[in-house]
Image (spheres, rainbow, N blue to C red):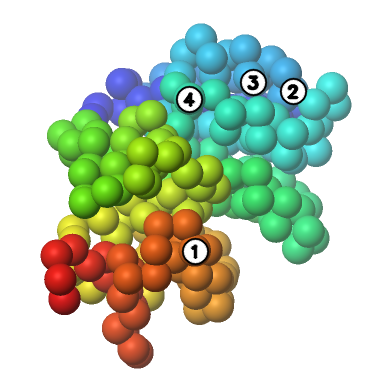
């Protein structure tokens, strides 16, 4: 996809940040939209459906955490990547951000070249349009566009990370995905999480879709099992 076809929404109440980061994104030929707070960001996102939203945490009117939660409730933004942009380093801010569906975190100030490299990395996480949107595996149906999982004719409520993990594992049934592959795809390079994080998400998935579907390959990773293994 050409950069001019990629829409990025930059949200920050600091006009200097909007100008500096906005300048570098436009210089890289991205189609840029801006907003000064969470409320305006939601309005713009609904209208433009950006590929990437760069969202400040601390803002008036509506902060980034609340805005992210509301953005994640909009079905047509399911495939939009959301990353927080903030000078805050407190752990609780990051945890809160990921809990409401953020994909990553960018600390400011950030050098232009590093920012553009980070943006390219984030955009690679966007699902390919050539990928089948409906995955059917036995009594399990996954609709990647509608962000739905149906098991035994009942829709399951999966948080974003669990959905991304399940989508990854079912993209190639019976393939063993290493822990590094899972961390890279679901959490990204820049996010520091432990092996325990993967295990917890796997356990929650098993509780919802059944214990026999996801097999642990000790010392390597996990795979989604089809047929009778």
Instruction: Indicate which label's residue lies in the foreground, 1 or 4.
Output: 1
Against 27, residue 39 (above or below) is above
- In percent of width and height, residue 179 lies at 37, 75
Seen from the viewer's position, the closer of residues 133 and 64 is 133
**Do callouts 4 and 3 mark residues in contact (Cβ within 8 Å)?**
no
Q: Earlier in the sequence, mark 4 or mark 2?
A: 2
Tell me, for residue 207, which label it has, or none.
Answer: 1
- In percent of width and height, residue 11 lies at 65, 27
**Do callouts 3 and 1 mark residues in contact (Cβ within 8 Å)?**
no
Which residue, given by chain and number where applicable, does mark 4 sit on? Answer: 75
**Do callouts 2 and 3 mark residues in contact (Cβ within 8 Å)?**
yes
Seen from the viewer's position, the closer of residues 213 and 193 is 213
Q: CA distance from mark 1 to mark 4?
A: 25 Å
Q: Quadrant of residue 146?
A: top left
**Do callouts 4 and 2 mark residues in contact (Cβ within 8 Å)?**
no
Instruction: Indicate which label's residue lies in the foreground, 3 or 1.
Output: 1
Secondary structure category for the residue under label 1: helix
């Amino acid at each position: 996809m050409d950069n001019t076809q990629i829409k990025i929404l930059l949200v920050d109440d600091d006009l200097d940040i909007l100008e500096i980061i906005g300048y570098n994104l436009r210089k890289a030929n991205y189609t840029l939209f801006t907003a000064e707070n969470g409320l305006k960001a939601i309005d713009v996102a609904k209208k433009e459906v950006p590929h990437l939203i760069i969202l400040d945490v601390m803002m008036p009117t509506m902060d980034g955490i609340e805005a992210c939660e509301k953005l994640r409730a909009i079905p047509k933004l399911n495939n939009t990547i959301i990353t927080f942009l903030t000078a805050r380093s407190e752990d609780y801010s990051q945890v809160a951000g990921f809990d409401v569906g953020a994909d990553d975190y960018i600390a400011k100030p950030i050098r232009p070249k590093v920012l553009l490299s980070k943006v390219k990395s984030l955009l690679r996480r966007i699902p390919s349009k050539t990928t089948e949107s409906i995955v059917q595996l036995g009594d399990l149906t996954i609709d990647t566009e509608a962000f739905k999982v149906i098991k035994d004719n009942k829709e399951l409520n999966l948080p974003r990370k669990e959905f991304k993990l399940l989508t990854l594992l079912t993209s190639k049934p019976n393939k063993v995905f290493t822990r590094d592959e899972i961390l890279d795809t679901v959490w990204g390079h820049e996010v520091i999480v432990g092996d325990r994080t993967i295990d917890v998400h796997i356990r929650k998935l098993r509780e919802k879709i059944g214990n026999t579907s996801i097999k642990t390959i000790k010392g390597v990773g996990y795979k989604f099992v089809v047929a009778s293994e």
